[in-house]
Image (cartoon, rainbow, N blue to C red):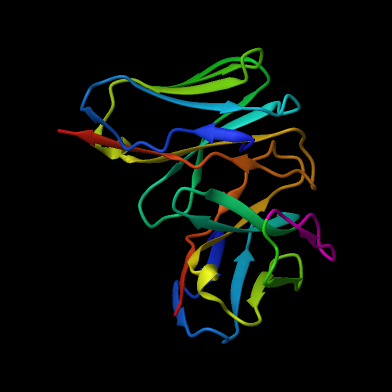
Amino acid sequence: QKEVEQDPGPLSVPEGAIVSLNCTYSNSAFQYFMWYRQYSRKGPELLMYTYSSGNKEDGRFTAQVDKSSKYISLFIRDSQPSDSATYLCAMSARTGTASKLTFGTGTRLQVTL
Amino acid sequence: NAGVTQTPKFQVLKTGQSMTLQCAQDMNHNSMYWYRQDPGMGLRLIYYSASEGTTDKGEVPNGYNVSRLNKREFSLRLESAAPSQTSVYFCASKARDLYNEQFFGPGTRLTVL
């Protein structure tokens, strides 16, 4: 079983829809949670970063962490065609020079006109 | 700032050939990473360098070697390429204390025939 599970999709939604992307994990030591966005044939770029449990909002994006359920979510409001990309969750147990990230496999999102 | 740069962008090798993938960052980051990305597998860590002068194995190191040439550069070498090494390779870097954000390069698409 993988440490981080993520539905690969693809997920297709109409423009303006609310999108929910999710990851589950098994390692209870994870406490730093990230969402990366990756456009086709590009490198991943950091979208959201949260520490421990709770919510974080940035514009149309909201990240939620529920450590008791080992479940994280990314919500996209008023989705746009420019949001079409693969979304990767990533998590880590620690910070510092030797810290490593464990990634989900990514969910491919298509926002249609 | 160019961020993280990788060369080459594309490469086709025959089985048994060798090659070196180059990575450089101009952000004065301490840590650097090499990942491979395969469909359905997500990003998997090959090797990383927590700081100049140190390297460590990641999740899938077999068949690869690395060199942290200086603080800016981190190269990945395939001594005898195999078809199983066909993948997209990403280099990333991270500042010492900046959360866990890793900055990714644009990737190298490698095909081994």
Q: Residue at x 47, y 25 (%)?
A: A22
Q: Position of residue B5 (x, y in %)?
A: 54, 65
Quarter occupied by the N terminus of chain B: bottom right
Q: Is residue A70 magenta?
A: no
Q: Which range of residues does the magenta coloring cover?
A: B49-59
Dominant SS type (magenta): loop
The foreground one among A94 and A78 is A94
Compared to residue B48, the image places residue A109 above or below, namely above
Q: Position of residue A87 (x, y in %)?
A: 44, 38
Q: Position of residue A94 (x, y in %)?
A: 77, 34
Q: Residue at x 55, y 50 (%)?
A: B43
Extreme right residue here? B53
Q: Position of residue B16 (x, y in %)?
A: 58, 86
Quarter occupied by the C terminus of chain B: bottom left
Extreme left residue here? A113
Residue A72 shows in this picture? yes
Task: Identify the image quadrant of residue B27.
Answer: bottom right
Extreme front residue here? A1
Q: Residue at x 47, y 54 (%)?
A: A43
Residue B28 shows in this picture? no
Compared to residue A102, the image places residue A64 above or below, namely above
- Tag count: 0
Compared to residue B110, the image places residue B30 above or below, namely above
Q: On the picture, is A78 further left or further right than B21?
A: left
Q: Residue at x 80, y 47 (%)?
A: A98
Q: Is residue B57 magenta?
A: yes
The foreground one among B107 and B83 is B83
The foreground one among B87 and B5 is B87
Q: On the picture, is B26 further left or further right than A8?
A: right
